[in-house]
Image (spheres, rainbow, N blue to C red):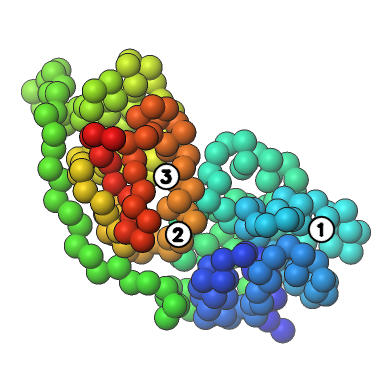
């Protein structure tokens, strides 16, 4: 009997991609497009739940709490899969009782590996299928070639050692990106950014005054092996704007076209 997994996400494309690849690995996978829909189902036959957090009305956290309060379901493993990648969200998810936490955008091979690891830890048998990664026909394949950087008045970092390679800082007014220490400062104050947020800032500061489509952003920032949804892009942009304060206003949106970094706003 195949292991049954339920994917709960209000983005149909994510559900379809995960369902397709889980079934290729030998699992039986179903989808629910909201926490409410999932709670109306018979959940007892499922050995694992992959749950988005940011859903309308009931969140993934709400679903997990209800699951853990049901004696027949409280020991069922949960993997949260969300664009929220802050420490607080991760800790909250694990404290609720999640067994793992995957951030969007994700690589399919990583998701499959984490599914297998959770099922091993919880004692659920594994299907003996090849672990070759499959990609859904609904998943966009990005073929846009990476854009060549065009640097704007870089400030050169002093050479401390002749054998070390130092890349120049990228500067826009009081916003400074140090590519050697992988850090970002505003007027000398450190801005705490995730690796992906730092990648986005680097791309925008080296490719200013042009709007880039979502496909171009994915190809140049995330790469072609990662499943990236519109929501993941929008969430990263919104979070980055907030962290950059006044400089966040320079990250502009052109509806129907994409995002860009404008020097003059």
Q: Is residue 243 left or right of residue 142?
A: right
Residues packed near mark 1 inside 10 Å, few (<14), some (14 to 19) or many (20 plus): many
How far is the residue under mark 2 from the one under mark 3?
Answer: 11 Å
Mark closer to the observer (3, 1): 3
- Dot 2 falls on a residue whose secondary structure is helix
Residue designated by label 3: 237
Which residue, given by chain and number where applicable, does mark 1 sit on? 67
Q: Who is closer to the viewer here, 124 or 24? A: 24
The mark nearer the N terminus, 2 or 1, is 1
Is the residue 189 above or below the residue 67 in the image? above
Q: Mark 2 points at which residue?
A: 230
Residue drawn at x 13%, y 34% as measured from the top left: 152
Of residues 117 and 248, the one nearer the viewer is: 248
Residue 218, image x and y in percent? Answer: 33, 58
| Image coords of residue 20 (percent x, y) | 53, 78
What is the distance, in whole Å, between disc 3 and disc 1 at their CAs? 32 Å
Question: Which-is-in-front pick, marks 2 and 1?
Answer: 2
Report the side of 207 relative to 213 (left or right). Answer: left
Secondary structure under tag 3 reads: helix
Nearest the viewer among 68 and 172 is 172
The answer to which of marks 3 and 1 sits earlier in the sequence is: 1
Residue 220 lies in quadrant? bottom left
């Amino acid at each position: 009997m195949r292991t049954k997994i339920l994917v709960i996400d209000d983005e149909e494309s994510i559900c379809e991609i995960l369902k397709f690849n889980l079934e290729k690995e030998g699992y039986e996978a179903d989808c629910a497009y909201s926490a409410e829909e999932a709670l109306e189902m018979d959940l007892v036959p499922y050995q694992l739940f992959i749950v988005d957090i940011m859903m309308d009305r009931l969140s993934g956290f709400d679903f997990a709490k209800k699951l853990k309060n049901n004696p027949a379901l409280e020991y069922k493993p949960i993997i949260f899969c969300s664009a929220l990648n802050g420490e607080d969200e991760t800790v909250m998810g694990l404290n609720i009782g999640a067994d793992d936490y995957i951030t969007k955008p994700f690589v399919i091979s990583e998701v499959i590996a984490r599914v297998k690891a959770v099922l091993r830890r919880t004692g659920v048998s594994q299907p003996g299928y090849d672990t070759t990664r499959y990609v859904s026909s609904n998943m966009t394949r990005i073929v846009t070639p990476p854009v060549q950087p065009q640097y704007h008045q870089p400030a050169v970092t002093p050479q401390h050692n002749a054998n070390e390679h130092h890349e120049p800082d990228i500067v826009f007014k009081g916003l400074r990106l140090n590519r050697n220490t992988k850090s970002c400062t505003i007027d000398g104050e450190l801005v705490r950014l995730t690796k992906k947020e730092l990648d986005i800032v680097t791309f925008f500061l080296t490719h200013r005054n042009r709007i880039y489509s979502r496909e171009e952003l994915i190809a140049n920032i995330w790469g072609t092996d990662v499943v990236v949804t519109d929501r993941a892009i929008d969430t990263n942009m919104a979070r980055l704007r907030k962290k950059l304060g006044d400089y966040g206003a320079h990250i502009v949106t052109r509806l129907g076209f994409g995002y860009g970094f404008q020097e003059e706003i």
